[in-house]
């Protein structure tokens, strides 16, 4: 059995009026605020700690974990993890899973921990809020955490705003990201596009146009401002993806206005235009055609 060491403020037993070892998660009032939940610091055997089943994070970078493990071997654990007590020999992780995993890699036998009294709902809330406050979450992980706070903890957006210390508009904007197609959400997770790009894509009603513009943005390196203009131009009409068909040399070095003109022309003539361009600026604009009627149609457009 792990004994209580340094207590915070009044002893936990005096606050609750009994022996802390006898306290179970079912005895805690479901409405009790997590900010008011008592806690104490102790050292716990790492083998007595189990992973948080409510963990909002999906992925842990192994390279970063190894770096943290080396730091822990040299300096030890600077910030205690946070757990809740299940029974005398079992604790459940609330926050600090990266530190916990890295400590396992570093070969530590025990960890300093804040032991908190929390039911399932409080544990989920603490885990979500702790993760949201971290700077290394991707936008989709943050959005999912906000959604879970609202749906599973049953908070309004205003209450959620108060819990995490963010403006309500910030929470609303993150939640909107979950309305994007899965391909674009994956791009946000992997960092191939920014929040600004995603916001521009959200202004487009047609899902196919959203996806096509997403892939062309990656292929052509559109800035947020350029994508905002494209989204404005194609908010009501279909944008045809060109990045997959194009075999372009140095296409990304072309001014955005030229890339847009190539795209517009390819839509008008219903053909995939190919551009070959050298570093010196010389090149060829190749317009394919299927028959004499296609060729006549192209000439007609050019003459206009």
Image: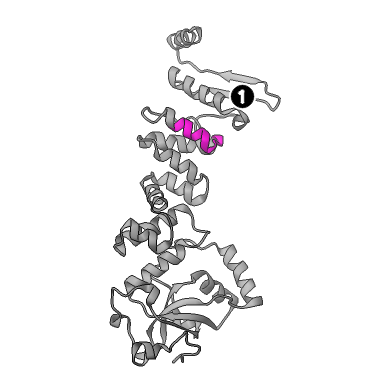
Task: Where is residue 177? Give x, y as percent.
Answer: 40, 48
**Which one is in front, 140 or 294?**
140
- Where is mark 1, residue-wise? 276
| The quadrant where residue 74 appears | bottom right
Q: Is residue 287 left or right of residue 235?
A: right
Task: Where is residue 218? Give x, y as percent.
Answer: 52, 39
Please name the residue shown 60% across and 32% down the image. 252
Which range of residues does the magenta coloring cover?
Answer: 220-231
Q: Is residue 61 left or right of residue 212?
A: right
Q: Pick the quarter of the image with the N terminus.
A: bottom left
Please name the residue shown 37% across and 68% down the image. 125
| The quadrant where residue 152 appears | bottom left
Task: Where is residue 47? Give x, y as percent.
Answer: 48, 82
Residue 226: within the magenta?
yes
Please name the residue shown 40% across and 69% down the image. 126
Task: Where is residue 108? Give x, y as percent.
Answer: 57, 81
């Amino acid at each position: 059995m792990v004994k209580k060491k340094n207590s915070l403020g009044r002893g936990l037993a005096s606050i609750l009026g009994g022996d802390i070892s006898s306290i179970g998660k079912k005895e805690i009032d479901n409405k009790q605020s997590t900010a008011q939940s008592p806690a104490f610091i102790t050292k716990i055997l790492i083998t007595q700690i189990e992973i948080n089943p409510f963990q909002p994070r999906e992925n842990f970078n192994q390279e970063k974990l190894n770096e943290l493990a080396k730091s822990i071997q040299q300096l030890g654990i600077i910030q205690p993890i946070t757990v809740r007590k299940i029974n005398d020999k079992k604790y459940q992780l609330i926050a600090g899973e990266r530190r916990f995993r890295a400590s396992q890699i570093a070969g530590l036998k025990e960890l300093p921990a804040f032991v908190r009294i929390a039911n399932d709902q409080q544990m989920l809330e603490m885990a979500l809020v702790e993760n949201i406050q971290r700077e290394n979450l991707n936008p989709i992980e943050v959005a999912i955490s906000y959604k879970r706070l609202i749906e599973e903890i049953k908070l309004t957006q205003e209450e959620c705003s108060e819990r995490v210390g963010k403006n309500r508009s910030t929470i609303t904007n993150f939640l909107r990201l979950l309305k994007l197609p899965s391909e674009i959400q994956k791009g946000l997770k992997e960092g191939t596009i920014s929040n600004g790009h995603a916001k521009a894509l959200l202004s487009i009603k047609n899902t196919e146009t959203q996806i096509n513009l997403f892939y062309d943005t990656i292929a052509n390196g559109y800035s947020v401002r350029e994508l905002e203009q494209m989204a404005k131009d194609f908010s009501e009409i279909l944008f045809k993806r060109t990045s997959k068909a194009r075999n372009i040399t140095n296409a990304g070095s072309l001014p955005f206005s030229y890339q847009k003109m190539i795209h517009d022309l390819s839509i008008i003539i219903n053909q995939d235009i190919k551009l070959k361009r050298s570093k010196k600026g010389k090149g060829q604009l190749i317009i394919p055609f299927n028959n004499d009627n296609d060729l006549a149609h192209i000439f007609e457009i050019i003459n206009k």
